[in-house]
Image (cartoon, rainbow, N blue to C red):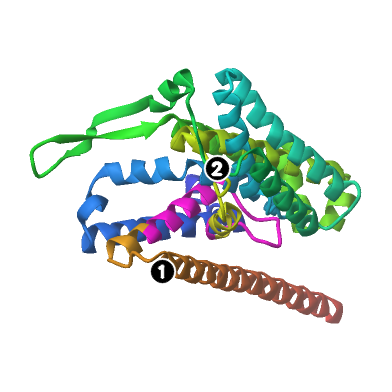
Amino acid sequence: MKNPFKMFKRKEPLTDTQLLMTITIVIFFIMYLSAVLFLGGGFLHAKQIFDMLNDNVSLIIVACGLTVVMIGGGIDISVGAVTSLVVMACVLFLNRGGSIVGSILLAIGIGLVFGLVQGFLISYLEIQPFIVTLAGLFFARGMTTILSIDPQKSQHKAFNDLREKKIVSSLLGYTAKNGNKIPAKIELGVVVALIVVILIFVMLKYLRLGRNLYAMGGNQQSALMLGINVKRTRFLSYVISGLLSGISGYVFLMHTGAGNATNAAGMEMNAIASAIIGGTLLTGGVGSAIGTFFGTMSLTTINKIVVTSGLNEPYWQKITTGGMLCFFILLQSVVLGRRSGKKSSGKIKAFFRRFKRSKEEASA
């Protein structure tokens, strides 16, 4: 006879990745609901969420690429500069008669070149990731300035028509005080960003490359003993990061419609912060694309709260970002520290139980 209580058996405990992701999601909703209750204003409307997404599509995509690299135990600080280079190269290409398809291929090509070169230097020549990607940052910034010092606005009619296309929803909009209906608008870049988040989530959770990344980031020596090709896995993580930087640059251009030598300045730091807030550990082995998405939204929400509270100076946002980052790092340390402590305590207790049992059996 089947056990009728089988369905009530205790489920498997959450992994570190799932636990930190859950904490990030819960904190995001608490922050947003608190903003709705105490600040009201734009937070009362769904349009605020869509505006936050529209403004941060590039950051979401870049942060997903960094999540992949960081899970494998690496770092890539060139992503913001590569994004800026892609924006400038694509806008100049379009203004000189290039096609939309050609500009997309150019963006992907630039991102892939950086990913391939940096991935090769880091994985196969074993140069420190920070040094290689720092060099990539300076190179990309310099190339952006060489292309054009002056701001460049897109004059390509077909591209401008494409970037003006939006998904409009009156249902999710709101009615202004003068009686006008303000619809919610979702840019095409948001769709691209959400597809990227889903694809990276699937890759990390279900594909061999994702499992290899977690194993490599958790313990490289153990990964080698399991037969994982560590060099190839690390190389592919940087290729993915470079590819997503190229896509991010094109989406950035679709949002702004212009290129500037200072585009995406500091994006790499915001992307690292978003990944950490989303539950990705700098030491590797833990992280998820969904967590990074909510980490980006949490970072954006706290900045919106600061501005809505009347603290409009840019330094207040930086101070808040720093404080939030420190809070999440401490939270991760406490949660994972307590968890590992419980695991160690459980193993010690089990050892003494086995020792006591064997002693009793010997005396009998």
Q: Which residue is mark 1?
A: 316
Q: CA distance from mark 2 to mark 1?
A: 29 Å
Q: Tell me, yes or no, whether the highlighted magenta stretch contains residue 147.
A: no
Q: Position of residue 262 (x, y in %)?
A: 56, 49
In the rendered image, the vertical position of residue 245 relative to residue 299, given as above or below: above
Q: In the rendered view, would you say 102 is above or below 333?
A: above
Q: What type is the residue that disc 2 sits on?
A: Asp
Indicate the position of residue 155 as horizontal and vertical percent values.
47, 25
Mark 2 or 1: in front is 2
Q: Amino acid at mark 1?
A: Trp
Q: Quadrant of the N terminus?
A: top right
Which tag, 2 or 1, sits closer to the chain's start? 2
Q: Secondary structure at mark 2?
A: loop
Q: Is residue 297 left or right of residue 250?
A: left
Q: Which residue is mark 2?
A: 150
Quick one: quadrant of the C terminus?
A: bottom right
Magenta part of the protein: which range? 277-303
